[in-house]
Amino acid sequence: MEFDDVQIALCDLEKLIPDAVAQALRDENPDNLLKWLREKLPEYAEPGFWEEAPPGGLNAFAAQCRHLIWNSLPVPGNNFLPRPLPQPGRNDPGPCGSELKYKWCCAALPKPSSPDPLNLWPFVLDQVPKQKLDEALAKNRLPLEGVIAAAMNHLGDEGHEKAVDLLEPLFGGSLKKPRPGLEVALERCRGWRRS
Ligand SMILES: [Zn+2]
């Protein structure tokens, strides 16, 4: 079994990432995210896959997933900035809990690329309670790109309500008045995304 195969073929990342973000933001504790991944990863793989994997494989994979997701994640309790885990030293214990030194276990795994933080914003902002979100928007705590990425994700929803809520503060309340205001705003967002 090649580690890359697991990553590419067997893990349903499109489902895993939003679920893992929701879990991570429940208490903003990376240790609990790791526990959750160890328990839940098999549900995102082909049935039975992890039963055949070598011992420790699941834990190493969970540790790597945790590292990739957590380190790119805007943390609401940290002013929406990531709180990356320190990179283990070669002689530190492996983050997977194998009791081997890092250099003998997880360090040997290939390093897949991290998710683009921009791709995480929609899932992050979906988890933030409306009041906290409005406050952060009003105080300009959220990067424009992140807000737009989240709003774009809600386009096509019935009434675009969430998209409007997110974009409203950027346009000084003009979005909710005439309908064309929304269309103009969205057109501008599409322009920003392209540039
Ligand atoms: Zn390890």
Image (cartoon, rainbow, N blue to C red):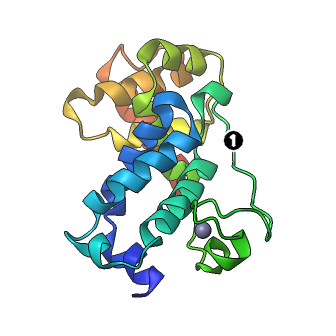
Residue 177, image quadrant: top left
In-image side of 55 versus 52 (left or right): right
Q: Is residue 188 visible?
A: no
In-image side of 28 versus 100 (left or right): left
User: Residue 121 placed where, x, y %?
Assistant: 50, 42
Q: In the structure shown, which secondary structural element does the residue marked by tag 1 occupy? A: loop
- 18 in relation to 111, above or below: above
**Amino acid identity at mark 1:** Arg
User: Residue 137 placed where, x, y %?
Assistant: 57, 21
Residue at (42% x, 38% y) in the render? 23
Q: Which residue is mark 1?
A: 83
Residue at (72% x, 76% y) in the render? 103
In this view of the protein, which residue sits in the foreground, 17 or 119?
17
- 166 in relation to 118, above or below: above
In this view of the protein, which residue sits in the foreground, 17 or 169?
17
Where is the C terminus found, in terms of image quarters?
A: bottom right
In-image side of 111 versus 56 (left or right): right
Q: Residue furthest front?
A: 99
Q: Is residue 36 visible?
A: yes
User: Residue 100 placed where, x, y %?
Assistant: 66, 70
